[in-house]
Amino acid sequence: DRDSFFPRCYDLSLVGDETCVFHGDFESTLARGVLRRVLTDGGLRPDGVPDEFMVRVALRVCKHQAAYEASLSNDEALVVRDDVPFVTPLETHERDALLSVAKRTGDAGNSNGITSSSHGDANRPVPESNQVVFLSAELKQECETVLRALDDGNVQVEMEGSRNVWILKPAGKSRGRGIGCVQTLEHVKQHVANGSNGLFEKQKQAWVAQKYVENPLLISGRKFDVRVWVVVASVAPLRVWVWREPYLRFCAERFGLDDVGNVFKHLSNNAVSTCSEAHVTDAFGDGNMWRLGEFKAWLKKEKLEEGIKNKKHDGEVTRAEGDEGVPEGGGGVYIPVKPDADNTNPVAFGTNVPSFDPYDPSQITDRDTEIDIWDSKIAPQIDYAVTSTLRCAEADGLEVTPKEHGRSFALFGYDFVLDDKMHVWLLEVNSSPCMEHS
């Protein structure tokens, strides 16, 4: 299930054009965020959702979304039904009221050591009691019921947050150029227009919109991503090697959802962070980057998250053959890929594949000794995402091996981010990646 590791993403180009679907998701995500925020705040508040009309519009959108999803059978999951339209029918003033919530400023982000708030509101000041207008019991119950129904079927609910932040990326560019975060459709249009300078961009409007992970794991208040090198040695059978010493890239400035336009808080590309004065004054490690060993040491020092530090996976966790004894600073390991159930698509396969599903909480049990959270929880999720994406590409005609079998390969740069529950999210896969500080 790609939704379990890949934040939903839409092709805004004139060729792939998923703009209408994106607009619908944007609106429904915003509506869910409004309900989450007002319930978290305990009611209406000046720096949150200030008006009951906004809540009722958001509630209407959420009820419509629930009705739309209920109208779809499993076999028709991608078909828009005529009886329940995909987008909620709203009057102009209703849609404007809903979109105005996204324009309101919010918290300054989380600055503690290990985690951030699930919805980005932990550090907002608690208002005086007379500043909060409580919802009626009936309205509150309606909000809780519909939100619970929608969240139960949403595997991305934790990372989704309540601020409706999306990230826009141009095609054919590298090193963070043109990437930006937005919260309104107006800003989406402005960003795409301002960033489409070349003839290709103007003609094709080659952009993608991806849901931003609003609850990233923070280290000293800073967001980071993980760059993993992946080599595909052949396609038939599919042979994948993953570099076992990935590195972390930190944002130059402290994370905060109060200023999504500040790329130094949200983009960890080295080429971007070097443009900030904080890249020198507040640098982490070597040029705002950590080796894996430094991250493991930090995880151990922090003693991990509650509910993680005394748990293990049900099934022996082993590294692939040949991985033992890899020195600090480098080492690759071959990742066996499971064949299809009907064995019609044979792939290289080994007996040392972890026997557990890293996304299945039922396979996690308690134990007294501390575990290595990277090897037992994070690395298996990365392996799962890598093999899953390559199997998708294989189905679409990925070609690596020429007639001279085994004499060529493809190198990819996978970028991941961890949320505050230690869940791994794949941000993107870079072909022909730059191997300098990037």
Image (cartoon, grey):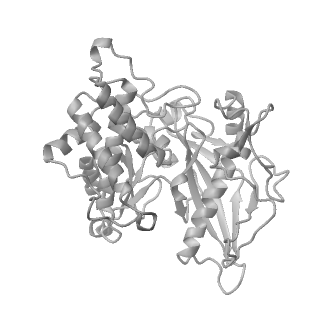
420 or 69: nearer the viewer: 69
Residue shown at the point (67%, 28%) measured from the top left: 302
Q: Is residue 137 above or below residue 191?
A: above
Query: In the image, is 96 to the left or to the right of 400?
Result: left
Q: What is the residue that sits farthest to the bottom in this orientation?
A: 403
Give the residue at x 34% y 16%. Answer: 127
Number of numbered tags placed on the structure image: 0
Residue 417 is left or right of residue 206, and the answer is: right
Nearest the camera: 190 or 364? Answer: 364
Return the x and y of residue 38 as percentages of the image width and height: 34, 29
Q: Is residue 27 visible?
A: no
Q: Position of residue 189 (x, y in %)?
A: 25, 53
Q: Is residue 315 above or below residue 277?
A: below
Residue beneath the point at 71% across and 79% down: 407
Residue 269 coordinates in the image, percent (x, y): 50, 48
**In the rendered view, does 218 fall on the left or right side of 298?**
left
Residue at far front of view: 138
Query: What residue sits 60% from the left and 63% below the top?
Result: 388
Quadrant in the picture for the N terminus = bottom right
Instruction: Please tell me which residue lies in front, 128 or 71.
Output: 71
Pinpoint residue 103: horizontal percent, then vertical percent.
26, 37
Quadrant of res 184 = top left
| Residue 70 visible | yes
Identify the image quadrant of residue 369. Answer: top right
